Image (cartoon, rainbow, N blue to C red):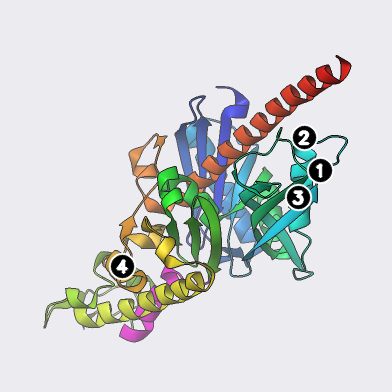
Amino acid sequence: MAKDRLLVGLEIGTFKVCAVVAEARPDGSLRILGVGESKSVGIRKGEIVDFNNAIQCVRDAIADAEEKADAEIESVWAAVTGAHIQSFNNRGVTPIPEDRGEIDGEDIRDVEASAKEVNIPDQNWFIHTITQHYYVDNQEGVVNPIGMVGHKLEADYHIVHGVKTRIQNTLRCIKEAGVEVEEVVINSVASAQVVLDQHQKDLGAIVLDIGGGTTDYLVYIDGAVQHSGVLAIGGDHITNDISIGLRIPIARAERLKIEEGSANPDEAQPGDTIILKNDSGFSGCEIERANLNRIIHARVRELLELVRKDIAAHCDLDLVRSGVMLTGGCSRLRGLAQVAGEVFDHPVHSVAAQEVTGPTSVFQNPQYATAIGVVKYAQLMQVEQETSSFFGKILGGLFSRRSHS
């Protein structure tokens, strides 16, 4: 396998650190070669709170991935999350010099720079500048303006930024673990690469990635990213509520949530009880299933309503015609899709990674969607760079020949 076709995606999550090794195929598909995991220690809400422990977790996940994929990992593409991450939309404008006329890569960079000439907090850093739409001399619907002739280039962008030091801590952690970082991508952008197809993006869709410590979301309207955000609420909040409400240890609350719980309060029958057996440091007890489900429902509904409120403030929900795509480890919680359907008043689908091959236990599991999505994002970025370079050379040679003819 060509070394440059080997891509590695790394997700540092609240519950687990996950490294996915994949082979980028010439036909655009991805084949997963191996997945390495380690239990998260020193990581809270997707951010590093204990540097040395986090380094070891990354090191363990990388070593596990190398063994599973039978490959040496030198660099990764990394997913980042956190409540500090913010986004907005802005338009950039740049004039095209009259002596040149045709638009080239430098104009694309100039119009992007123009869109980023805005005030963001001093401590923040630009993470993504995602193209929404191009306009050449007010002409709409331009997909790729390179090579076109015009006087003015405009572009709309979805711009994502976050606290620089928090992102740097993640990058330093990965580097200290012995690998380089090619680029970073926010969780929701990564997940969207593998849980949505182009038709769904065009129709309009919401990707809702509910993990252990955060909920990352992204909205596509008319094929372009319209909004994104991160909420510092995830599965661990539900577990904590169960622990407090039922007065049981956190570890038992987590198992109870996964094995017995539902976000649908109507799922429990009257008098239905669950017996928790004795355990080390826990004397056991009997609880009503209805109480468990009510606790889960309250937190899940609050989480979903907060996300909906933020999305509705930035997007027209009537333009989201494909519905809501649920992914992430917590998306497997029973009854969650039903509650989401009630809150968003849209069709809700539980989804995992698409258009990848390899162990089905990996790509069919929604908890791996982000890490697989990072690899897909890396593949798309490499193709984009190769295409831009290729067309740049062709156009450069073409206009060079014309100037000498």
**Residue bearing the label numbered 3:** 111
Quarter placement of the N terminus: top right
For label 3, the SS is helix
SS for callout 4: helix
> Toward which corner of the image does residue 205 lie, by quadrant?
bottom left
Pick the residue in front: 345 or 348. 345
Q: Nearer the viewer, mark 2 or mark 3?
A: 2
Q: Which of the numbered marks, if any, corresponds to residue 385?
A: none
- In space, the residues marked 1 and 3 are separated at their CA atoms by 10 Å
Q: Are marks 2 and 3 in contact (CB under 8 Å)?
A: no
Q: Which amino acid is tagged 1?
A: Ile
Distance from label 4 to label 2 (Cα)? 48 Å
Mark 4 touches mark 2? (CB < 8 Å): no
Q: Which residues are magenta?
A: 232-246
Other residues around mark 4 within 10 Å, as few (<14) / some (14–19) / many (≥20) = some
* Residue at point 49%, 30% (across, down): 28
**Mark linked to residue 341:** 4
Give the residue type that dot 2 points to. Glu
Contact flag, marks 1 and 2 (Cβ < 8 Å)? yes
The image shows residue 132 at horizontal and vertical percentages of 60, 52
Q: Which residue is mark 1?
A: 96
Tell me which numbered mark, 1 or 3, is placed earlier along the sequence. 1
